[in-house]
Image (spheres, rainbow, N blue to C red):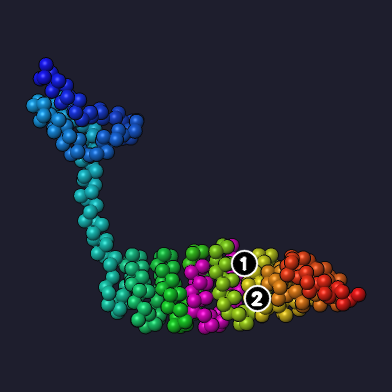
Amino acid sequence: MMEEQRMESLQSSEVKIPPCPPLEKGGKSAMPVPPLYKEGLRGILAKQVTADSRRGSSSPRVTELLLCKRCMARLMALFLVLIVSLPLTVKAKERAKPSSDLNALLQDLNSPDAATAMQAARAIKVQRSSAQESVPALAKAIKHPNEVVRMTVIEALSEIGPDAAAAVPPLAEALKDQDPMVREAAALALFGVGKASAAKVQDLVRCLGDPNKRVRDAVILALVGLEQAALPRLLGALGSKDQLVRDTASQALGRMGPQAVTDLVTVLKKGDPNASPAASKALAEIGEPAVVPLIEVLTTGKKQAVILAGQTLAAIGAPAVPALVEALSKKR
């Protein structure tokens, strides 16, 4: 009786191995792979042998698994792929790893291998102490044939900041790149360089109508950073026939704040069908600092200007109410 109970206990502890799933044409499984197969062949056999050793007999389940040619073929194919690909992966990593020496890194920037050039650019970006010395080589690498390398190089120049002033001309050329991510990176780099980018303000203004919103936002950031140097060009862009250019210029002027109010009110007074509505949008974004000049237009301007001034004050909302009430009471 005791022996029968012991045998039943051993049998219940046996690892249940489901049969190999049938395959469809093309080598794909017709049903989900049972969780037990995910443990690997070694884990399955180890559990089965443990159960067999307790029972003192060989299990037909092990024999069934070993004879499952499809499972074994899959495992062997996977093993061969790993063996073949491992040396290639190691070799690629060794080839892509640049030297820590600055001169070697600068040479790697011109490598036709994208991984090598990109790793060099990243290493130079980390070495801030020698960043300025790397600017000429980085500026040259902006023309690398690989777009990811170009973007990485431009990001390195952006990190360098004002010390990368010598790279402003090639950065301005990069605003024309076919890849929108490169154009965006170039605009952000010009923002990072700062005042030295004023020499290429017209190139930034040309990008106000870029079809990519991320590029336009980066251009706005760069132009706002230039402040007065960009103001005349942006005011001129308000009269563009391109609605997208007008809207983007209006956003940039709106973010410039009080320094742009006087010029925007002047544009609004002229009543230009394109520029005046765009100026109105910019003044509405500036808000309270534009209230008093707009009230002056409201009380003394021509009809079209008065209408726009009223619409702008309405868009500003609550901040305009006290000054507007005071002006109307004085007029009475």
Tell me how far mark 2 sits from mark 1, CA to CA: 22 Å
Please report the bounds of the magenta region as a residue range. Answer: 183-211
Residue designated by label 2: 257
Q: Nearer the viewer, residue 65 or 272?
A: 65
Which residue is pictured at 44% across the width and 72% down the height? 154
Bin the neighbour count of mark 1 within 10 Å (Cα to Cα): few under 14, some 14-19, many 20 and up. some
Could you tell me which quadrant the C terminus lies in? bottom right
Residue designated by label 1: 209
Q: Please tell me whether the stretch drawn in magenta is mainly helix, strand or loop.
A: helix
Residue 183: x percent and y percent?
Answer: 51, 68
Question: Looking at the image, is mark 2 or mark 1 earlier in the sequence?
Answer: 1
Q: Amino acid at mark 2?
A: Gly
Res 275 visible: no
Per the image, label 2 sits on a secondary structure element best described as helix
Q: Amino acid at mark 1?
A: Gly
Residue 302: x percent and y percent?
Answer: 86, 74
